[in-house]
Image: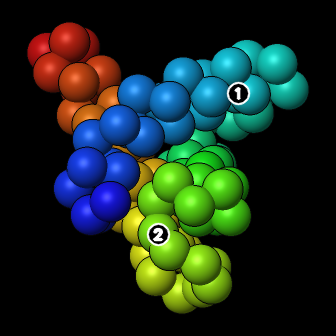
Amino acid sequence: MDILTFTSGAIGLVIGLTEAIKRAVALEERWAPLLAVIIGVGLAFLGSAAGLVLPKPVGALAAWYGIVAGLAAAGLYSGFKATMRG
């Protein structure tokens, strides 16, 4: 699976998990992008370990996929939020 396919599928999941964790533990808004990157990297490593994202062995490329997915999700969320506020 290439990075675009993984990122496209992971963005919604990263946004949803980030929001759920923020609300569950009352996390400050400023920590949300870091949390999104951590979740993205975790999803990439889980997917790689299962052989869904990258062929084994899991390594730096899986981390890169996760970082891109997390940053894309955080950017999409903040951009949409800023647009809706006006």
Q: Position of residue 49 (x, y in %)?
A: 68, 64
Q: Secondary structure at mark 1?
A: helix
Q: Quadrant of the N terminus?
A: bottom left
Name which residue lies at 21% across and 56% down. 4
Name which quarter of the figure residue 19 lies in. top right
Residue 67 visible to the viewer: no
Mark 1 is surrounded, within 10 Å at the Cα level, by few (under 14), some (14 to 19) or many (20 or more) other residues, namely some
Front residue of 48/64: it is 48
Name which residue lies at 23% across and 24% down. 80
Front residue of 60/84: it is 60
Residue 22 visible to the viewer: yes
Mark 2 is surrounded, within 10 Å at the Cα level, by few (under 14), some (14 to 19) or many (20 or more) other residues, namely many
- The three-letter amino acid code for the residue at tag 1 is Lys
Q: Which residue in the protein does label 1 denote?
A: 22
Name which residue lies at 82% across and 19% down. 24
Name which quarter of the figure residue 65 lies in. bottom left
Q: Is residue 72 left or right of residue 55?
A: left
Q: CA distance from mark 1 to mark 2?
A: 29 Å
Q: Quadrant of the C terminus?
A: top left
- The three-letter amino acid code for the residue at tag 2 is Leu
Q: Position of residue 31 (x, y in %)?
A: 63, 48
The disc at residue 54 is 2
Q: Is residue 79 left or right of residue 21?
A: left
Q: Of label 1 and label 2, which has the lower sequence position?
A: 1
Q: Position of residue 58 (x, y in %)?
A: 62, 79
Q: Eyeballing the image, is 55 above or below 16?
A: below
The disc at residue 35 is none
Q: Secondary structure at mark 2?
A: loop
